[in-house]
Amino acid sequence: MLRCRDGSLYTGITNDLPRRLLRHRAGRASAYTRARLPVRLVYRESQADRPAALRREAALRRLSRAAKLALVRRAR
């Protein structure tokens, strides 16, 4: 999960986090984050495989903003 300049949270999946972060920070990974640079990694999880990662991403996106922020605070 990334925190954008405007305070919004972006959730996505990748199998190469360092590369994906570089692409986000360069404005080449997502139109959403490109318009809200800079971004900072605030939460991450590992999953066993891509289907599990997609399911978890969907679950995280359904969370309220307050629940996402609580998750980020617990991860610190």
Image: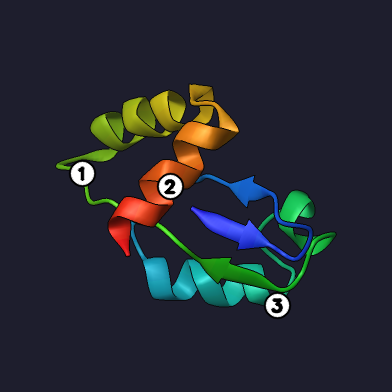
Which badge, 1 or 3, is on the more N-terminal residue?
Answer: 3
Residue found 33% across the figure and 31% down from its top: 56
Rendered-image quadrant of the C terminus: bottom left
Against 2, is 55 above or below?
above
- The colouring scheme, among rainbow, by chain, secondary structure or one colour, is rainbow
- Badge 2 amino acid: Ile
The span from disc 2 to disc 1 (Cα, nearest Å) is 10 Å
- Badge 3 amino acid: Ala
Pick whichever, 42 or 69, lies toward us.
69
User: Mark 2, residues whose alpha carbon is within 10 Å: few (<14), some, or many (≥20)?
Assistant: some
The span from disc 1 to disc 3 (Cα, nearest Å) is 26 Å
Residue 26 has which mark? 3
Q: Secondary structure at mark 1?
A: loop
Please provide percent x and percent y for residue 27.
Answer: 74, 69
Please provide percent x and percent y for residue 62.
Answer: 51, 22
**In the rendered structure, are the residues bearing label 2 and label 1 in contact, judged by CB atoms less than 8 Å apart?**
yes
Which badge, 2 or 1, is on the more N-terminal residue?
Answer: 2
Which residue position is annotated with label 1? 47
Against 59, is 39 above or below?
below
Pick whichever, 25 or 65, lies toward us.
65
Regarding residue 6, the answer to whether it shows in the image is yes
Which residue position is annotated with label 2? 13
